[in-house]
Image: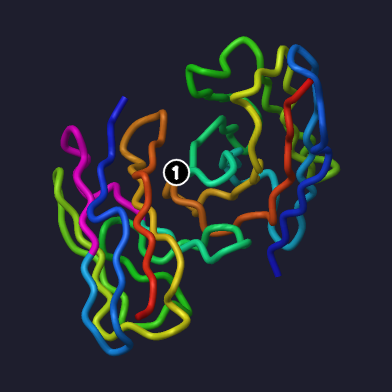
Amino acid sequence: EVQLVESGGGLVQPGGSLRLTCAASGFTFSSYWLSWVRQAPGKGLEWVANIKGDGSEKHYVDSVKGRFTISRDNTGNLLYLHMISLRVEDAAVYYCARDKPAAAGSYDHWGQGTLVTVSS
Amino acid sequence: DIQMTQSPSSLSASVGDRVTISCRASQSISRYLNWYQQKPGEAPKLLISAASYLQGAVPSRFSGSGSGTDFTLTISSLQPEDLGTYYCQQSSSTPWTFGQGTKVEIK
């Protein structure tokens, strides 16, 4: 069974930093693109970043470029999102999601999400 | 960036009704269109990929159609468990973008 479990969310002040982790199991981790998708309270979904199975390609939405870094540990089956210079508008539930095979951008499995609150 | 626009933003329908949700892309995305269902307090769930490909275990009352810029999600006979918010998403080019969502309520 595919499982994605996020952790690392919490309360941080504007300008602060946080690292989110997604622990994966139940599939060949290194074979899949993975993404972070966020959802601000009461709002819609926003794709944040993705990373290729071998880590050789990464893409980001413009609003987080230079502040967020996506990475992965294929030995430990872990996906990360390192966030710095956090803004109030970054507050959201952050989901990790797995791309369908040969269908980049279509997410067939999601974690339960971890809440990031940015407030002074 | 490709903008995705859904209509309506919300709807209320009775059990057994046929429900249609529209999604329009700001430029052609071929058939790179996905539909997700999100129930309150849960993560989204992929219903349909590539505009019309129903995911395994998704009930056959759900169907998708369209290509280019105009797409439709249809629920042929609404059931109580279908309440939630439905999102379209383009996977033609990054940044992948979602519609604003359509909230489905049961009368």
Label 1 sits on residue:
A105
Q: Is residue B26 magenta?
A: yes
Q: Toward the viewer: B54 or A114?
A: A114
Judge whether B38 appears above or below A30 on screen: below
Q: Toward the viewer: B27 or B87?
A: B87
The amino acid beneath tag 1 is Gly
Residue A19: percent from left, percent from top: 80, 28
Tell me where residue A39 sits by quadrant: top right
Q: Chain of mark 1?
A: A
What colouring does the structure picture have? rainbow
On-image quarter of the C terminus of chain A: top right
Residue B52: percent from left, percent from top: 26, 64
Tell me where residue A85 sits by quadrant: top right
Measuring 41% from the left and 66% from the top, which residue is drawn there? Answer: B47
Measuring 20% from the left and 61% from the top, which residue is drawn there? Answer: B72
Measuring 73% from the left and 26% from the top, which residue is drawn there? Answer: A118
Q: Toward the viewer: A48 or A45?
A: A45
Q: Is residue A85 left or right of residue B37?
A: right
Q: Is residue A113 left or right of residue A44?
A: right
Judge whether A51 appears above or below B30 on screen: above
Q: Is residue A65 left or right of residue B75?
A: right
Judge whether A108 appears above or below A86 on screen: below
Q: Is residue B50 magenta?
A: no
Measuring 65% from the left and 22% from the top, which residue is drawn there? Answer: A88
Magenta residues span: B21-34
On-image quarter of the N terminus of chain A: bottom right
Q: Secondary structure at mark 1?
A: strand
Mark 1 Cα shell of 10 Å, populated few (<14), some (14-19), many (≥20): many
Residue A80: percent from left, percent from top: 75, 33
